[in-house]
Image (cartoon, grey):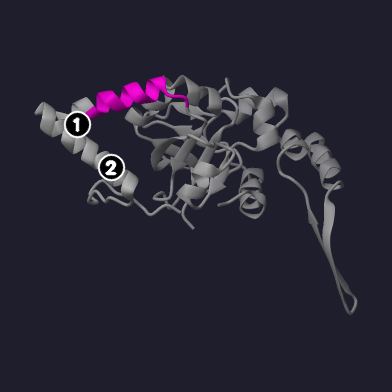
Amino acid sequence: SREVAARVEGVVKGAAVTRAHYQNDVATVTMAMPISGKFLQAVWPDDQATSRLYQPGNATALDRLLARADTWLGSLSIIASAHAADPFVIRNEADAKAVRAVLEWMEQNQVEQPGADLSRALADFETSSVFSGLLIDASAVPDFELATIPNIRDEEGTLLYPTKATSYDDIVNKRGVTYDFDLQDAVRNRRVATKPFVIRALSTYKNLSSDLMIRAADAKRVTQSSSTVQAMNKAGVLIVVAI
């Protein structure tokens, strides 16, 4: 609309010149401006947040522009792809210590259904622990398109993020999510540090290339963790993507 265009033009006029290059009769000027804050507030005003922000499939030319801007301006910081059929790999001493503890527990208690018991123990831990954000590994989802405010859904299409409980101010001031290329860097990223709740994305949702889908079981784990939900409501979400 003309109103949005006017607001965006006003913000862009405040962009800072970062480099000027002159050659013969041609002058090239490079300017920079933050996506978060005034610009995002201009294109997603508060009165449209609930009607537009949280509806499925609202990918516009502006969304694609902002998605590309994330690759330029975002704090992009890869996890190797993991598949269900891959063998379990111990990558470090912490992994080895955890495996030893599980094997010792199984041997001492003659556990008949270790999977069920371990799942219950994990659920108890996640419910009672305090997490600092949600970290989603989408490195195995090749058709995911970066967006400033992507949607996170379960297999039924239920929207987990963002929702009406998500702070509008945090969305516009922090951007919807932060992207990273490396798991270790992502865990330390201040967006979700220092103890994020980590899950994997299965794919994009139907034909919505900027909507990530996670397993229903993982969605349930996330919603049962009050600290994770609280962090998500303050835009504490980071997505790891492949190069």
Mark 2 Cα-neighbour bin, 10 Å: few <14, some 14–19, many ≥20: few
Q: Is residue 121 magenta?
A: yes
| Of the image marks 2 and 1, the number of the one nearer the N terminus | 2
- What kind of residue is marked 2? Lys
Residue 109 visible in the picture:
yes
- What kind of residue is marked 1? Gly
Q: Residue at x 28, y 39 (%)?
A: 98
Asked if the residue at tag 1 contacts the one at tag 2, i.e. Cβ–Cβ closer than 8 Å, the answer is no
**Stretch in magenta:** 118-130
Q: Is residue 120 left or right of residue 45?
A: left
Q: Is residue 123 left or right of residue 30?
A: left
Mark 1 Cα-neighbour bin, 10 Å: few <14, some 14–19, many ≥20: few
Identify the residue position indicated by label 1 in the image. 115
Of the residues tagged 2 and 1, which is closer to the observer?
Answer: 2
Identify the residue position indicated by label 2 in the image. 97
Q: Is residue 130 above or below residue 178?
A: above
Q: Residue at x 31, y 27 (%)?
A: 122
Q: Is residue 233 left or right of residue 105?
A: right
Q: Is residue 193 above or below residue 84?
A: above
Give the image location of residue 151, x and y in percent.
51, 35
Q: CA distance from mark 2 to mark 1?
A: 18 Å
Give the image location of residue 1, x and y in percent.
76, 36
Q: Quadrant of residue 29?
A: bottom right
